[in-house]
Image (spheres, helix red, strand yellow):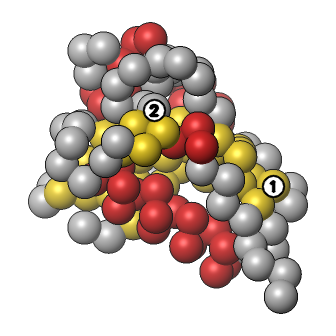
Amino acid sequence: MDLSPLTPADIPEVMRIERTPGYDAVVGRFDAEEHAAQMALPTVRYVGIRDGDGLAGFVILQEFDQPTVLLRRIAVSHVEKGVGTRLVRGVLDWVFQTTSAVAMKLDVAVGTRGPATSTNGRAFASMTPTRSTT
């Protein structure tokens, strides 16, 4: 499973994952027009991870032109399979290796339970990844 940038052709798959039962309270949803508008912005990136022909998960990165990039949304099609962990680690590596970002912040509803707030028992909200300056 490799990271790849997403395009408007991926919007139906993104929307399918967003509409996974239980995600409405923790992941958030856009309609197709809002996804297309977000994808068209120069400060937004959609990055996904594929499993065969289908999308296994995606993230929405915003404020991509800022020193601190916003990780707006993380969603995977199947929880507890390690896809979210691989996705987040891959995105962190990619952002810090290919941009001048020095930090990332995560937009998450603290106190929620489920796939958007935990991986392997750790809360995403506790992650504060930053680029080392030494």
Secondary structure under the numbered disc 2 in the rendered image: loop
Identify residue for label 1.
68
Choose mark 1 or mark 2, whichever is in front: 2
Residue 56 horizontal/vertical position (percent)? 25, 48
- Is the residue 126 above or below the residue 26 in the image? below
State left or right for residue 57 relative to residue 51: right
Q: Are marks 1 and 2 in contact (CB under 8 Å)?
A: no
Q: Which mark is residue 105?
A: none
Q: Secondary structure at mark 1?
A: strand
Q: Position of residue 49 (x, y in %)?
A: 33, 57
Total label count?
Answer: 2
**Can the viewer see residue 111?**
yes
What label sits on residue 117 in the rendered view? 2
Q: Residue at x 40, y 37 (%)?
A: 118
Residue placed at 25% from the left, 54% from the top? 82
Earlier residue among tags 1 and 2: 1
Residue at (30, 14) in percent of width and height: 22
Q: Image height check: is 75 above or below 91?
A: above
Q: Is residue 61 above or below residue 16?
A: below
Q: Amino acid at mark 2?
A: Thr
Q: Is residue 62 left or right of residue 24?
A: right
Bin the neighbour count of mark 2 within 10 Å (Cα to Cα): few under 14, some 14-19, many 20 and up: many
- Residue 79, located in which quarter of the rendered image? top left
Q: Position of residue 87 (x, y in %)?
A: 39, 57
